[in-house]
Image (cartoon, rainbow, N blue to C red):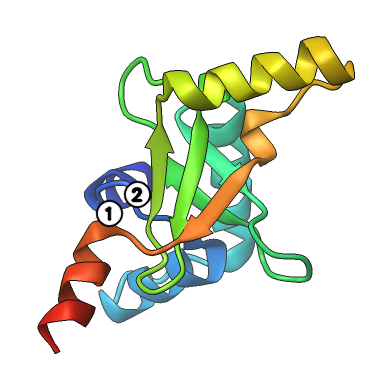
Amino acid sequence: MILTYLASLGGSHITAAGIAGHFQTLKSPIGKTTVYRHLERLVESGKVRRYFLEDGESACYQYIPGNSRCEEHFHLKCENCGKLFHVNCDTLETVASHVRKKHRFTINPLKTVFYGTCSRCEGKARSR
């Protein structure tokens, strides 16, 4: 049920408390401990990705569809709606390669998140 719910979020991420709250509203409560236990298994199996986007905030979780490999690309987070986007971008890969070769430092794309505004939120702001 947890995996199905995460898949239904369409790429958005959510905390374990948010997942437990969702099932509470459906009158099908699942305790936080159970949610965490199942999320850990889903993370280990590669079906769900765990993110720590802000220091001091709870981890959030996101469904990984099919054969998606999160460690091969960077992420963008909209500061307005909170949606997390996976980005396959040759330019960012070039930057990562440059940093690796010229500065002897390997960027971890799993922990690299660029913050900004998505096109949907930008469009809403312009229409106001």
Position in image of residue 45 (x %, y %): 54, 23
Q: Split into 4 quadrants, where in the image is the C terminus?
A: bottom left
Which residue is situated farthest in the right direction here? 104
The residue drawn where x is 31% and y is 59% is 118
Residue nearest the observer in this picture, 61 or 16: 61
Q: Which residue is mark 1?
A: 9
Q: Is residue 98 left or right of residue 122?
A: right
The residue drawn where x is 76% and y is 22% is 99
The reply to whether dot 1 and dot 2 touch (C-beta < 8 Å) is: yes
Q: Is residue 46 at all visible to an observer of this figure?
A: no
The residue drawn where x is 25% and y is 69% is 122
The amino acid on which the numbered mark 1 sits, given as a three-letter code, is Leu
In the rendered view, tell whether residue 119 sits above or below residue 42: below
Q: Which residue is mark 2?
A: 6
Which quarter of the picture shows residue 117? bottom left
Q: Secondary structure at mark 2?
A: helix
Position in image of residue 116 (x %, y %): 46, 61
Q: Secondary structure at mark 1?
A: loop
